[in-house]
Image (cartoon, rainbow, N blue to C red):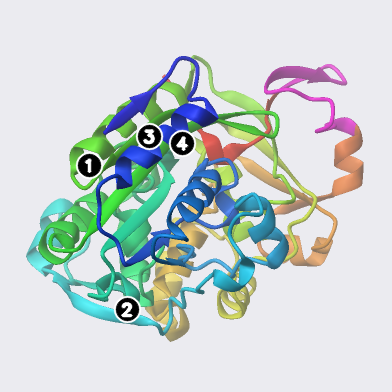
Amino acid sequence: MIFTADPYLSDAALREALAQAIAGRELHRVLLLPPDYTRLYSGAGKITAVFYEMLKDRCQVDVMPALGTHAPMTREECEAFFEGKVPFDALIVHRWRSDVVKLGEVPADFVSRVSEGLVNTAIDVEVNRRIVDPAYDLILSIGQVVPHEVVGMANYSKNIFVGCGGSSMINASHMLGAFYGIERIMGKDHSPVRQVFDYAQTHYLADLPLLYVLTVTTSEGDRTRIHGLYIGAQRDVFEEAVALSQKINLTHVKTPFQKVVVYLDGREFKSTWLGNKAIYRTRMAIADGGELIILAPEVRRFGEDDENDRLIRKYGYVGRETVLRLVEENADLQENLSVAAHLIHGSSDGCFRITYCTRHLTEDEVRGANFDYLPYDEAAKRYDPAVLTDGWHTADGEDFYYISNPALGLWTTE
């Protein structure tokens, strides 16, 4: 089922579409897999709230946010994201390091072929135990299709294999993307990582009562606009969503930016693990020798959990070749390849300067991670996010391009 509207779906149309998706089903137990609060503008929080209200008196409803490697949601985040409709105590925490089961593997020869020989090892297929629990009559995987730095276009089976996946698959898939090259992946469908997920979907999820509920969105201030809603079990709904997202979430520029200023909403971005979307989504539009200013008022740490944070602090965003060498030399990175991939993605490889403007991370911490530093309040006086709008501006005779939410798009030269 595909629902689109110009300019966007109304709340009434959204509710009717979701009602159609579950109409006529005999349900006893349902699992909802929404993203977490870091997908604030996905529309998935509202969709989860609607499903929960529709189903809670019909059957048992379990809600497990697809956290991936992220920190569990707080009570305040749950209240805001699910519009007060999903009780915080009802949330199940996905523990990506432990609460998973291995279903099989993607063979080494397949991985080698799709990666053009860059990776030649099998990849474990791991998911949270609940995904394969036969007690569920229906599993609703809810999320946003948008350009993504690891898989090319986010969501669909990524919500299962990463959002609800285990450490081995998360590590291997992220490193596969890093080896293949972020510039060759972002904004595209059939990346090597996506092909690995497609293989795993076909071979290990085909018999599950799994239904994808995918959105394509933009934002207008704090309001999310859902332009397309795609519901189904097959890949075609994802492909339709990809086509719309590529149309409305990609910005092509004729001339590379010399200076870009990106704001990280403090409600959504509290770590560089998440905040480096400011780097990923703009890197293909920034000129060699250019500068990226990241306004990060609530970024307080590097990793989303203590171990990832420790490793980022230890090694820093030191560039692709250096990180690959460090992986060869250090067991802790070999055991945490998603961190190694993150370090590769979070560096400009010396092509442009990256300045993090923070309140909570100190100058020594920021510079220790191999970024330049500017105090947030000082930077915000010059680049005031309360005043700036997306697009071109001039400050002190200097032109710059401003982006208020890097999570909703991809900027690249033509």
For marks 4 and 2, give the CA distance. Answer: 30 Å
Residue count near mark 4 (Cα–Cα under 10 Å), binned few <14, some 14–19, many ≥20: some
Q: Say which quadrant the N terminus sits in.
A: top left
Residue count near mark 2 (Cα–Cα under 10 Å), binned few <14, some 14–19, many ≥20: some
Query: Which SS class for mark 4?
Result: helix
For marks 3 and 2, give the CA distance. Answer: 29 Å
Please give the name of the residue rendered at 21% of the width and 48% of the height, measured from the top-left corner.
233
Q: Amino acid at mark 1?
A: His
Which numbered disc, 4 or 1, marks the residue that appears first in the sequence? 4
Q: Amino acid at mark 4?
A: Arg
Question: In the rendered structure, are the residues bearing label 3 and label 2 in contact, judged by CB atoms less than 8 Å apart?
Answer: no
Which numbered disc, 4 or 2, marks the residue that appears first in the sequence? 4
For marks 4 and 1, give the CA distance. Answer: 32 Å
Q: Is residue 384 visible?
A: yes
**Which label is found at residue 41?**
none
Query: Which SS class for mark 1?
Result: loop
Q: Amino acid at mark 3?
A: Ala
Which numbered disc, 3 or 2, marks the residue that appears first in the sequence? 3
Residue count near mark 3 (Cα–Cα under 10 Å), binned few <14, some 14–19, many ≥20: some
| Badge count | 4
Relative height, residue 253 to residue 73 (above, below)? above
Question: Which residue in the structure is indicated by mark 2?
Answer: 129
Question: Which residue in the structure is indicated by mark 1?
Answer: 190
Query: Which SS class for mark 3?
Result: helix
Relative height, residue 153 to residue 322 (above, below)? above
**Which label is found at residue 17?**
3
Please give the name of the residue rendered at 59% of the width and 38% of the height, measured from the top-left corner.
406
For marks 3 and 1, give the CA distance. Answer: 28 Å
Region of the chain picked out in magenta, as a range: 382-400
Please give the name of the residue rendered at 60% of the width and 46% of the height, measured from the top-left corner.
40
Question: Which residue in the structure is indicated by mark 4?
Answer: 15
Picture coordinates of residue 43, whole percent (x, y): 52, 40
